[in-house]
Amino acid sequence: MKVTLIHNPEAGDDTQSSGDQIIRLIRRAGHKAKYFSSKGKNGKSAEKPCDIVAVAGGDGTVGKVARRLIDSRTPIAVLPMGTANNIANTIGVTGRKFEELIEAWNAAHCANFDAGVAKGPWGLRYFIEGFGVGLFAETMFKIENGQHPHVSRSEDPEEEISAALKVLKTTIELPVQGFDGSA
């Protein structure tokens, strides 16, 4: 079987398998594999002819690849590496070793999944895991588009939450307060 692996090297923590390790597991199971980093400039990699697209990453990476393959008949295999792994939990592949998941590909059956679609001034956009509207969606949009450069990825979740709360409070024009309610 020809496998295209899309791997997010930044997913999860330092205990996750590397791209090289995953490729070795895929080849050891008897498959031909090509590696693509989700962080690279090869955005069309998931569209190259193959028998299966394996996605090693979290919900963001899985959703991004799934959206690219909406009109394709190419199956997607999820190798969960994220922190939440909501999609992987939904399809029942969390808590299993990569070796076990990869070895099961030959006997696996395909199942269709639903994709939502949102239409607005931005055009048509598909979504896989979820969507949001209102204050939180607007805040995430502003953060992701660099309108709040002081909010950056941090190793400390409390720091990220605190920065996002400041953006929320700015958006609704309230004074910024600490977690304890002080100004």
Image (cartoon, rainbow, N blue to C red):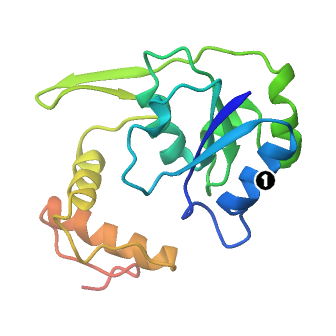
Q: Is residue 178 above or below residue 126?
A: below
Q: Which residue is mark 1?
A: 24
Picture residue at 62% right of the left edge, 57% below the top: 83
Q: Position of residue 117 (x, y in %)?
A: 34, 21
Badge 1, how many Cα within 10 Å: few under 14, some, many 20+?
some
Q: Quadrant of the N terminus?
A: top right
Residue 67 in the image, given as x and y percentages of width and height:
42, 29
In this view of the protein, which residue sits in the foreground, 171 or 94? 94
Residue at image position (78%, 35%) is: 31
Position of 153 with respect to 35 (left or right) is left
Work out whether residue 80 can be spotted: yes
Please count the marks in the image. Answer: 1
Q: Residue furthest front?
A: 32
Q: Is residue 128 visible?
A: no
State the quadrant of the C terminus.
Answer: bottom left
Where is residue 44? Give x, y as percent.
39, 37
Q: What type is the residue that disc 1 sits on?
A: Arg
Task: Give the answer, above or below, for where 79 lies relative to 122.
Answer: below
Give above or below for 127 relative to 74: below
Q: Quadrant of residue 29?
A: top right
Position of residue 61 measured from the top left corner of the image (x, y, whole percent): 50, 46
Q: Secondary structure at mark 1?
A: helix
Is residue 127 toward the left or the right of residue 2 in the image?
Answer: left
Identified at 67% across, 73% down, the residue is: 14
Q: Residue furthest bottom?
A: 182
In the image, is residue 77 above or below residue 8? above
